[in-house]
């Protein structure tokens, strides 16, 4: 089995679909892109146990926002030209970016930073973010199907509902609703929704968003989540590093969110450190590591961009798919 430590490509291999950049090389592509975030903004955007520095924003995310702004402008121009050719209407079609990666890889922080940066470009002022957590099956259904320990695996999602949501957004519909998930209660929040209203850019963040559709016996085609993406990003790190980040976050949550009696994991706030470490390690090995190896990591080669993080959370290497 290929491990997460293997390289996407060798820098000397001209047949690779990716071009690799060191952190320093990528940072040089910023050009004159202005820094529009403050230190205070960065603190608000980062997730628990996923620190991000201003240096990361300058070296990695500013060049990326510049690249994406070019891609969006080109796509908008092509869409308008096609509409003129077809004598069609002028419905606004969002540019959709998929963001994938393992549990604890830092997807939420990356998604929020990109949302903040891209919304500062003049031609993309309206940027929205959704997570696929909202399309998980409710706990009652997962329990009935014996899937609670498969939460986050492909079969635990209402994939059809997610596909229909993205199809409506991509068709330029207004006020499309997405369900909301609460990490506190570890479940879907009934009757609560996020409204996506013709954004310039929609970022879709989730574990399995790059999975291809499974073939059907009669050869008919079925739409899948990644079919609606104009660009995709995969957050990468070594397996052992991801495990350490997961356990560290779990231990920190014991003295924060888990203390809330409403928390699904409230019971873990009452156990000792040694038992908590054992529980966290068991959850990682039994659930998250299996999902990573079976479902998430195999989708990495489908990403347009791979951001590889080191043990200190800093992005050390960037792989951009060649056009």
Image (cartoon, rainbow, N blue to C red):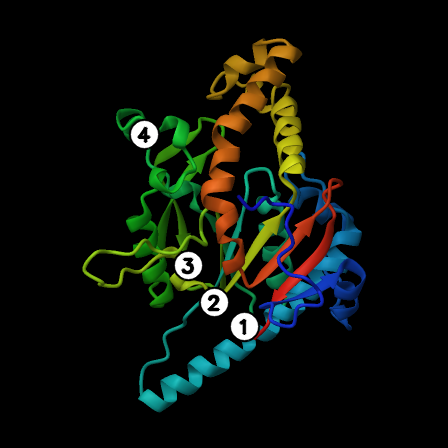
Residue 48 in sight here = no
| Count of marks, rendered view | 4
Picture coordinates of residue 8, whole percent (x, y):
62, 57
State the separation of the CA atoms marked 2 and 1.
9 Å
The reply to whether discs 1 and 4 touch (Cβ–Cβ < 8 Å) is: no
Q: Position of residue 86 (x, y in %)?
A: 32, 88
Q: Which residue is mark 3?
A: 226
> Gap between marks 1 and 3, in whole Å?
17 Å
Q: CA distance from mark 4 to mark 2?
A: 32 Å
Label annotation for residue 230: 2
Residue 314 in percent (x, y) is at 74, 47
Q: Characterize the local packing of mark 2: few (<14), some (14-19) or many (20 or more) Cα atoms within 10 angstroms.
A: some
Circle 1 is placed at which residue position? Answer: 72
State if disc 1 and disc 2 touch (CB < 8 Å): yes
Q: Nearer the viewer, mark 2 or mark 1?
A: 2
Sequence-wise first label, 2 or 1: 1
Say if residue 69 shows up in the picture.
Answer: yes
Residue at label 4? Answer: 142
Other-residue count near label 3 (Cα within 10 Å), few / some / many at <14 / 14–19 / ≥20: many
- Upstream in sequence: badge 3 or badge 4: 4
Q: Residue furthest left?
A: 218
Please, what secondary structure does the residue beneath circle 4 have? helix
Q: Decide which of 149, 193 is in the foreground and name it.
A: 149
Q: Nearer the viewer, residue 186 or 159?
A: 159
How far, Cα to Cα, is label 3 from label 2?
9 Å
Q: Give the mark nearer the N terminus: 4 vs 2.
A: 4
């Amino acid at each position: 089995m290929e491990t997460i430590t293997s390289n996407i490509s060798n820098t000397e291999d001209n047949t690779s679909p990716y071009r690799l950049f060191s952190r320093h090389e990528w940072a040089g592509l910023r050009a004159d892109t202005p820094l529009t975030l403050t230190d205070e903004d960065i603190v608000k955007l980062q997730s628990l146990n996923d620190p991000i520095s201003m240096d990361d924003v300058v070296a990695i995310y500013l060049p990326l926002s510049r690249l994406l702004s070019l891609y969006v402008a080109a796509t908008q121009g092509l869409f308008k030209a096609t509409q003129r050719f077809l004598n069609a209407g002028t419905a606004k079609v969002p540019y959709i970016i998929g963001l994938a990666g393992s549990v604890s890889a830092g997807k939420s922080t990356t998604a929020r930073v990109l949302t903040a940066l891209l919304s500062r470009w003049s031609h993309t002022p309206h940027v929205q973010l959704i997570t696929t957590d909202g399309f998980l099956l409710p706990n009652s259904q997962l329990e009935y199907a014996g899937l609670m320990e498969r939460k986050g695996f492909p079969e635990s999602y209402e994939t059809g509902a997610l596909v229909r949501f993205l199809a409506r957004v991509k068709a330029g519909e207004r006020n499309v609703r997405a369900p909301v998930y609460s990490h506190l209660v570890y479940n879907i929040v009934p009757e609560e929704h996020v409204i996506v209203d013709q954004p310039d850019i929609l970022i879709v963040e989730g574990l399995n968003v790059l999975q291809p559709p499974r073939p059907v016996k009669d050869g008919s085609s079925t739409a899948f989540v990644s079919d609606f993406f104009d660009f995709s990003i995969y957050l990468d790190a070594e397996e052992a590093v991801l495990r350490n980040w997961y356990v560290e976050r779990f231990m920190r949550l014991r003295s924060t969110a888990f203390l809330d009696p409403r928390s699904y994991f409230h019971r873990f706030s009452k156990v000792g450190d040694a038992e908590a470490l054992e529980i966290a390690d068991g959850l990682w090995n039994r659930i998250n590591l299996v999902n990573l190896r079976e479902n998430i990591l195999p989708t990495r080669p489908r990403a347009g961009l791979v951001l590889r993080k080191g043990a200190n959370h800093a992005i050390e290497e960037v792989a951009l798919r060649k056009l």
